[in-house]
Image (spheres, rainbow, N blue to C red):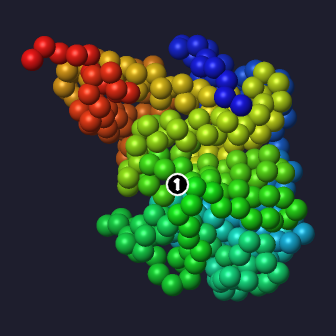
Amino acid sequence: MRPRAIALVLPLTLIAAATPRAGAQQPTARALTETWPEIVKVDGVEILHVQKGVYMLVGGGANVTVQIGDEGVTLVDSGAPGQGEKIVAAVRHLTKKPLRYLVNTSADADNVGGNGAMVKAAGGTNGAAGNGGGTANTGILVMSHENALNRMMKGTPAFPALTGDALPESSFFTPKKDFYANGEAVQILYQPMAHSDGDVMVFFRGSDVISTGDIFRTDSYPVIEAGGTLQGELDALNTILDITVPERNQIGGTRVIPGHGRICNEADVLEYRDMLTIIRDRVRDMVKKDMTLEQVKAAKPMLEYDGIYGTRKDWTGAMFLETAYREIVAANKATPAGGRNGPTPRKP
Ligand SMILES: [Zn+2]
């Protein structure tokens, strides 16, 4: 379901709840209504039970989602380069069953850098036989959107191209792909032009957990790069809100595993979506007034959010604002007056 926007000014409890770590004791309203599991730490990686057969691993790069059951293990993302072995050790703490599936949510180094280690731990790759819930029980099937695969093959200056078994052997360009694992339907949902051009989210339908990759994160503004857009981000966040169902008062129910940060509920995604919508609208109004980037920066349209989301050195609030500004200016030019992002009509 998609609830209506919450108030423009965040209540203090939400700001407190937005701190990156969800420890056992959280001095917020949430602590009174929910019990969070104790955190188990293996080789520096924290293991958190999320819901039913789904766990979250923290500390080896991006969050790694682990679904376990009788058939084996389904993973969403594999951690940063050099962290794969630690991720495997944490998974092995949960189960000795075979690693069957790995879905990469994008081509980011901290999400796919552990691919090779996963394939090695699984005893190799599992091609067509394992696809779509096949019967083979050796090897792992690595999946991603085609755009993400292309980026992994190309590499970046900071993250060299992946090769061989570390690359997804099953890529797709359809809006959806699904398979059945450990007694539940698993849906892979492509989100065009969000954080990148190859983002997917993974919805574990029976466990009622959605793993979002870097489309959604609690530790910073969305990192918009590699073909991503702010509008695509908003669309993707609305897709999450369409899927999530709260138990009561927007608490409980569907769990959301972000690319980075703590386990979330629908209310957290709603807050993030509203934050981005407010920023988008403010910047759009400024663009309509023909304000330059420097003028927009000076007007501080993200002032009340920078303390929470603008603290990263490698993706500052200013970098996010600049990206949003350029996109909105381009949209403004592309759609004439009256369009979605259209400027007010001007005299010739
Ligand atoms: Zn990431």
Q: Quadrant of residue 236?
A: top right
Q: Which residue is mark 1?
A: 199
Left or right placement of residue 257 versus residue 248 in this view: left
Q: Name the quarter where the N terminus is drawn.
A: top right
Q: Quadrant of residue 251?
A: top right
Q: Going 76% across and 53% down the picture, which residue do you hit?
A: 204
- The residue lying at 48 percent from left, 33 percent from top is 309
Q: Residues within 10 Å of mark 1 (few under 14, many from 20)?
A: many
Query: Could you say where residue 207 lies in the image, as x and y percent from the top left?
Result: 83, 50
**Relative vertical location of residue 209 with respect to residue 91 in this rendering, above or below:** above
Residue name at image x 23 percent, y 32 percent: 333
Q: How many marks?
A: 1
Position of the C terminus, as image quadrant, is: top left
Q: Nearer the viewer, residue 57 or 290?
A: 290
255 lies left or right of 58 = right
Residue 305 position in % (x across, y down): 46, 25
**Which image quarter: residue 175?**
bottom right
Label 1 CB less than 8 angstroms from ligand 1: no
**How far across and down, in percent of the image, does residue 311 sit?**
43, 35
- From what the image shows, is residue 10 above or below residue 245? above
- Going by the numbered disc 1, the residue's amino acid type is Asp
- Residue 326 in the image, given as x and y percentages of width and height: 27, 37
The one nearer the camera, 30 or 201, is 201
Q: Is residue 232 left or right of residue 267?
A: left
Please tell me which residue is depicted at 40% across the width and 22% down the height of the picture: 281
Element class at badge 1 = strand
Reply above or below: 302 against 313.
above
